[in-house]
């Protein structure tokens, strides 16, 4: 076939991800697809993968993607005629101590929430499934009957066959050497065999994806890391249907292969590869095996499977694989270049992910927006920091080393810190701040009182900071606190058509007078919530947008991409220009009034307004808004004056008992007040109507806005799900999110976010209650509710309004 000069879509890379993307594009009717492979199909990481296919992840939608992989692999061989080696032999996971058992019980509940079977087993029951293992140290185990294993290269070839049959063209020995971008959009690719003009590029180049991205300024933050496993000769007592086995306390995994075992693991001290770039000609290639490095895993494996002692070793594999700084893969349209998609960085679960990830990527390309909430893997979760190769290396190695360690609630990464700090960083540290990190920013999570070390001690029970956060919470409810929220992402949106453009993108009414502040969502075509932020009108032609720290790249890209053509507006990121101190609590007006040049009375400065006031010689943009349910202001000021403003606030607040407070207190306060968090309680899969945010949508006005049609259509039918609040009184129970919701004994959803409310003295969780016939309020409120927590049911109360209302609480008092 002649080399094409034109194609609608060019996929770079013929590993399992590129093949799956091509297969699913073709199934969607997009057959004008060319896949270019540098060497031969599967010659990157795919050919030497071990082939375990697990499904459970901490995100519901990523679990759904992996579930779909299993469904696809079930039928792929029959559909394409290509053998895949796929079998659903189930997956076993072991626990060797009490904390791990708790983790496994919580994972079982997560699995149930997401519709996956996962049963808890005693050590003896586990041994029945895996007769050749030693169980003397086992506390228990869990079994996922639908997990399985496959021959990775065969799955990829089957997907390629299916894609070819549907019209996609695959060209091997054809490296892409350049991706041409014109006016910020993909224009074409260059290869030694010629150029191809195309409107969409999909970078599925595996561990080469970072270098390929760099060709056109796209950041793909991943790092190649060596990953080893061995394959034994047949071992007596290994049946063909032996489940895959994960033994995280020993950092190892197993699967059956031709009557023997594959055994690999995750060393705590991983070895990166190709720091100077991947060598030319590295295809169907392996690295030298490193038995010294593998030895600790080997001795763990021998203890688990004594028969390994005498088993012959058939092969040692040391293959490089791309890993990412947070252990999740990278999917979606790159924020830097329009129509440039990425599917890479699969952290040694690319075979398990390929079916679902390829489908999601194909649907994203076809629809022009993500088919569902894919935030945990969305390429827009990264920022400038992740362009730094060294930072990515350091954090990725930490993430790799944690692959099998306990995933503690509230756990923070330790490497690559501090990267971005507020001007108050040292000052707050001196006052006992224990920092967490988000998108590189150091943020005070909580403050240790004198005599206590500001360090998290993790557990599945109440952690060491529980009491301190309670004090901060109380100080905010009863007195006044300062939160350093400098890490907020801040944008300016300006130009002659700023009002018209923002009115289209925002679902609330932002065409308000100068001086006003509006809380709004921004919706996708499905009516799902893409952004949740505040918009302050600075001038007729200028808005100030404030959004969550982690959403900087995502929200900026969303707003930019949705500015209607032909309108004159500019969007700029001004995050680094402003520090933010949030002064919150019933005494905040007294504190602010004592030092502010400007009237801060309710009449002069009502809720939902912003004013410029002077504090300590600094012009401060004060936003009257709250996320904690108390009177308060977000004070935005030039970075260089933050320290002076902070000192002035603390001095004026002294007689009111002012205190520092951190993000864990914010979380507890907002749960009590019923404020939703984007990324957990709300997101692209949830509409404002489902989330109880219909009041923040300009539905009654006749102004068109993005997502309006979908909301209109939804408002004419019964809602399929509705966000509700649940409480559990028993303080010995810890809610963390993902607990299963039962109504009258029937599973109806799971908790999206949860924590402890110190004022109401209850566990609080939010979650969507689902029902195919609709969720009317009387049906919702008439049920008897229970939550499954760590595999056990506990009674729960349902609430449809905020648990805590400061005004009501004070009247009652
Ligand atoms: C030792 C080991 C064990 C593993 N075990 C498992 C497991 O048990 N289960 C599991 O789910 N996953 C496992 N994995 C992970 C899995 O192999 C990968 O996640 C998966 O293969 C990644 O597929 P990919 O398509 O992204 O990358 P690749 O398979 O590497 O494909 C990328 C392709 O892009 C091509 N390419 C690069 N640059 C260019 C260019 N400029 N132009 C054209 N083509 C280009 C390359 O040649 C390559 O073929 C394992 C990995 C290793 C290393």
Image: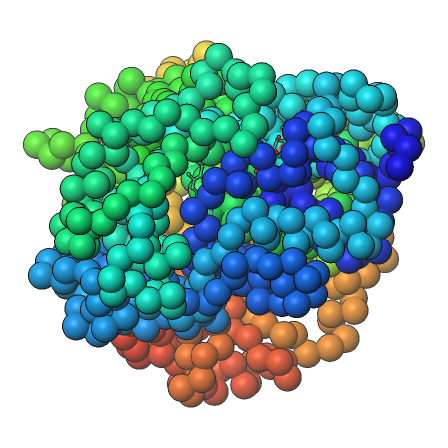
Q: Which quadrant of the structure image shows residue 241?
A: bottom left
> Residue 247, percent across and down?
25, 53
Does the image show residue 438? no
- Is 55 on the left-hand or right-hand side of 508? left
In the image, residue 528 lies at what x, y percent? 67, 56
Q: How many marks?
A: 0
Instruction: Please state, as top left, top right, bottom left or bottom right, where the N terminus lies in the image.
Output: top right
Residue located at (88% from left, 30% from top): 3
Q: Which x, y percent locates residue 177?
A: 72, 19
| x 38%, y 65%: residue | 240
Left or right: residue 236 versus residue 137 is right
- Horizontal side of 477 relative to 686 (left or right) equals left
Reply above or below: 52 against 571.
below
Q: Nearer the viewer, residue 560 or 285?
A: 285
| Percent position of residue 571, x then y | 72, 26
The quadrant of the picture showing ligand 1 is top right
Residue nearer the viewer, 292 or 424? 292
């Amino acid at each position: 076939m002649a080399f094409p000069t034109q194609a609608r879509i060019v996929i770079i890379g013929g590993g399992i991800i590129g093949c799956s993307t091509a297969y699913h594009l073709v199934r969607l009717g997009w057959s004008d697809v060319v896949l270019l492979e540098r060497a031969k199909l599967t010659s990157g990481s795919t050919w030497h993968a071990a082939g375990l296919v697990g499904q459970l992840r901490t995100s519901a939608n990523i679990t759904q993607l992996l579930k779909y992989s299993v469904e696809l692999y079930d039928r792929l061989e029959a559909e394409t005629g290509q053998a895949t080696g796929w079998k659903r032999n189930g997956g076993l996971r072991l626990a060797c101590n009490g904390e791990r058992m708790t983790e496994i019980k919580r994972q079982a509940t997560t699995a149930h929430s997401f519709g996956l079977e996962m049963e808890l087993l005693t050590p003896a029951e586990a041994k029945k499934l895996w007769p050749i293992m030693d169980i003397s140290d086992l506390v228990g185990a869990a079994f996922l009957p639908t997990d399985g294993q496959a021959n990775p290269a065969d799955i990829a070839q089957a997907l390629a066959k299916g894609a070819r049959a549907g019209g996609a063209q695959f060209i091997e020995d054809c490296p892409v050497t350049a991706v041409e971008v014109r006016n910020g959009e993909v224009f074409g690719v260059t290869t030694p065999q010629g150029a191809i003009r195309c409107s969409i590029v999909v970078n599925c180049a595996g561990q080469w994806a970072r270098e390929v991205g760099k060709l056109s300024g796209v950041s793909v933050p991943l790092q190649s890391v060596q990953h080893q496993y061995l394959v034994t000769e047949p071992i007596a007592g290994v049946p063909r249907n032996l489940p895959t086995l994960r033994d995280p306390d020993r950092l190892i995994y197993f699967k059956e292969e031709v009557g023997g075992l594959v055994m690999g693991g995750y060393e705590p001290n991983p070895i990166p590869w190709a720091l100077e770039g991947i060598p030319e000609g590295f295809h169907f290639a392996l690295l030298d095996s490193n038995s010294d490095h593998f030895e600790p895993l080997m001795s763990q494996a021998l203890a688990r499977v004594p028969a390994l002692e005498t088993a012959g070793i058939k092969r040692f594999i040391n293959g490089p694989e791309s890993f990412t700084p947070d252990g999740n893969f990278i999917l979606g349209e790159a924020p830097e270049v329009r129509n440039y998609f990425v599917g890479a960085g699969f952290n040694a679960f690319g075979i398990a992910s390929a079916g679902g990830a390829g489908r999601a990527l194909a649907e994203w390309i076809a629809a022009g927006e993500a088919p569902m909430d894919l935030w945990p893997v969305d390429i827009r979760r990264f920022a400038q920091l992740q362009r730094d190769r060294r930072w990515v290396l350091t954090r990725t190695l930490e993430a790799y080393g944690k692959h099998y360690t306990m995933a503690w609630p509230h756990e923070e990464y330790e490497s690559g810190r501090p990267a971005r700090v507020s001007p108050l960083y040292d000052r707050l540290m001196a006052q006992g701040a224990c920092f967490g990190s988000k998108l590189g920013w150091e943020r005070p999570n909580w403050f240790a009182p004198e005599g206590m070390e500001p360090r998290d001690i993790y557990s599945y029970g109440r952690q060491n900071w529980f009491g301190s956060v309670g004090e901060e919470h109380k100080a905010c409810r009863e007195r006044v606190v300062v939160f350093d929220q400098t890490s907020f992402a801040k944008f300016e949106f300006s130009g002659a058509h700023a009002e018209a453009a923002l009115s289209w993108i925002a679902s609330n009414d932002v065409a308000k007078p100068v001086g006003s502040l509006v809380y709004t969502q921004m919706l996708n075509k499905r009516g799902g919530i893409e952004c949740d932020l505040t918009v302050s009108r600075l001038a007729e032609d200028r808005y100030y947008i404030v959004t969550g720290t982690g959403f900087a790249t995502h929200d900026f890209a969303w707003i930019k991409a949705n500015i209607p053509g032909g309108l004159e507006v500019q969007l700029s990121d001004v995050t680094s220009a402003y520090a933010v101190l949030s002064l919150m609590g019933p005494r905040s007006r007294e504190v602010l009034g004592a030092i502010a040049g400007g009237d801060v009375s309710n009449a002069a400065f009502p809720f939902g307004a912003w004013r410029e006031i002077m504090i300590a010689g600094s012009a401060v943009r004060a936003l009257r808004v709250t996320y904690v349910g108390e009177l308060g202001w977000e004070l935005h000021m030039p970075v260089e004056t933050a320290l002076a403003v902070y000192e002035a606030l603390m001095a004026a607040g002294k007689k009111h008992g002012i205190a520092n407070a951190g993000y864990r207190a914010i979380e507890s306060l907002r749960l009590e007040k019923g404020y939703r968090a984007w990324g957990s309680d709300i997101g692209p899969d949830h509409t404002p109507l489902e989330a109880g945010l219909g009041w923040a949508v300009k539905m009654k006005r006749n102004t068109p806005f993005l997502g309006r049609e979908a909301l209109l259509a939804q408002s004419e039918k019964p809602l399929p799900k509705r966000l509700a609040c649940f409480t559990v009184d028993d303080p010995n129970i810890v809610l963390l999110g993902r607990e299963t919701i039962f109504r009258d004994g029937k599973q109806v959803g799971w908790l999206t976010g949860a924590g402890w409310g110190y004022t109401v003295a209850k566990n609080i969780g939010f979650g969507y209650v689902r029902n195919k016939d609709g969720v009317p309020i009387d049906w919702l409120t008439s049920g008897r509710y229970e939550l499954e927590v760590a595999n056990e049911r506990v009674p729960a109360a349902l609430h449809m309004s905020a648990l805590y209302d400061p005004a009501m609480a004070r009247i009652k008092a």
